[in-house]
Amino acid sequence: MKILVVGSGVMGTGIAYAAAISGFETTIHDVSNESLKKAESSITDLLSRQLAKGYLTEEQKAFVENHLIYETNLEKCAGDTDFVIEAVPEVKGIKQKVFEQLDRFTKKETLLATNTSTMSPTEIGSYTERPDKVIAMHFFNPVHRMKLVEIARGLETSDETVEVVKDVAIKMQKDVVVINEMPGFVTSRISSLVGNEAFNMLMEGVGTPEEIDRAIELGLNYPMGPFKLGDLVGLDTRLNNLQYLHETLGERFKPSPLLVKYVKAGRLGRKTGKGVYSYE
Ligand SMILES: NC(=O)c1ccc[n+]([C@@H]2O[C@H](COP(=O)([O-])OP(=O)(O)OC[C@H]3O[C@@H](n4cnc5c(N)ncnc54)[C@H](O)[C@@H]3O)[C@@H](O)[C@H]2O)c1
């Protein structure tokens, strides 16, 4: 099976790596050549680190080096793919354009999965002529370490599509849950709420980021505090998620003004070197 990953940011890079080390012929596409170059260098680094730790074999590393293709022209790479995983920004207009293009450029039987954290696979399916073959396949960051893939079926998603997506996720050594769509699924809905409330607490002067993170990690047994997680996810992505949940599920998801301020300042987290914490 040939897999095409669309978008080579934080998630697309991780998904392409996970697909390729699992033996899938994989292509990763991005409109930005710079982003593809960054993806290639992260994947090269990750291959070496995982090999050194004994998590990968020489054969897996060689397979990725020989079979993972980086491509800026979507039309060129979409035609012979069997399975697409989209990981472009969580912005409706961008997702819509990408799915309309994928519907035109891929074979009619190709399955189209979206890595959206919050958006409706039913609505995304409606951008295509094949809503039965559209589904949400939600990976977690960092993809090579996180076990779960949350699969959310849209109204028209067929049972056959669900089965193929489960198989692909399991071949990528992930555990799966299959749920019916609601904005934010299970994980983003809870995580957005916790992350947003942490920003409100910071704004109210309840504690420093370190104190709030430690309280949640040690008192609630979360592996990572909400600010560390927010910086890893990207504060812009977190804000996009909250805006969508605010629109669809109501006031309790209203983005914290402090989060909005950080995003306006370009403090997006690890990817820009500064978020709540500094990484320089
Ligand atoms: N960051 C996370 O922790 C996380 C976790 C789970 C799911 N997600 C979801 O994954 C998706 C991607 O998030 P991300 O954090 O990787 O974003 P990102 O901003 O790191 O990467 C997005 C990439 O998409 C590219 N892009 C933009 N428009 C494009 C187009 N028309 N065609 C092809 N590529 C295009 C950009 O150049 C960029 O490289 C979002 O839907 C997000 O909600 C993110």
Image (cartoon, rainbow, N blue to C red):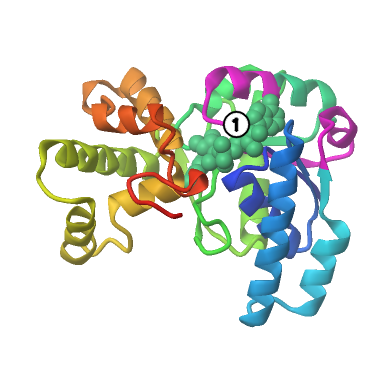
| Residue 44 percent across, percent down from the top left | 73, 63
Residue neighbourhood size for the residue with mark 1, other residues' Cα within 10 Å, grouped as few (<14), some (14–19), many (≥20): many
Depth check: 142 or 236 in front? 236
Tell me if residue 60 is in the magenta stretch: no
Q: Range of the magenta residues?
A: 71-99
215 lies above or below 26: below
Tell me if residue 167 comes above or below residue 111 in the rendering: below
Q: Nearer the viewer, residue 164 or 208?
A: 208
Task: Determine the residue positioned at 44% across, 50% down.
Answer: 232
Residue 100 lies in what quarter of the image?
A: top right
Q: Position of residue 210 (x, y in %)?
A: 23, 57
Asked if residue 91 lies in the magenta stretch, the reply is yes
- The x and y percentages for residue 75 are 86, 28
Which residue is at a point 88% across and 61% down the rendered structure image?
66
Q: What is the secondary structure assignment of the residue under circle 1?
A: loop
Seen in the image, is 4 located left or right of residue 201? right
Name the residue rendered at 61%, 65% in the picture.
Answer: 173
Q: Is residue 50 visible?
A: yes
Establish if 139 lies above or below 184: below
Where in the figure is residue 83, as x and y percent of width and height?
Answer: 75, 42
Q: Amino acid at mark 1?
A: Thr
Q: Is residue 22 visible?
A: no
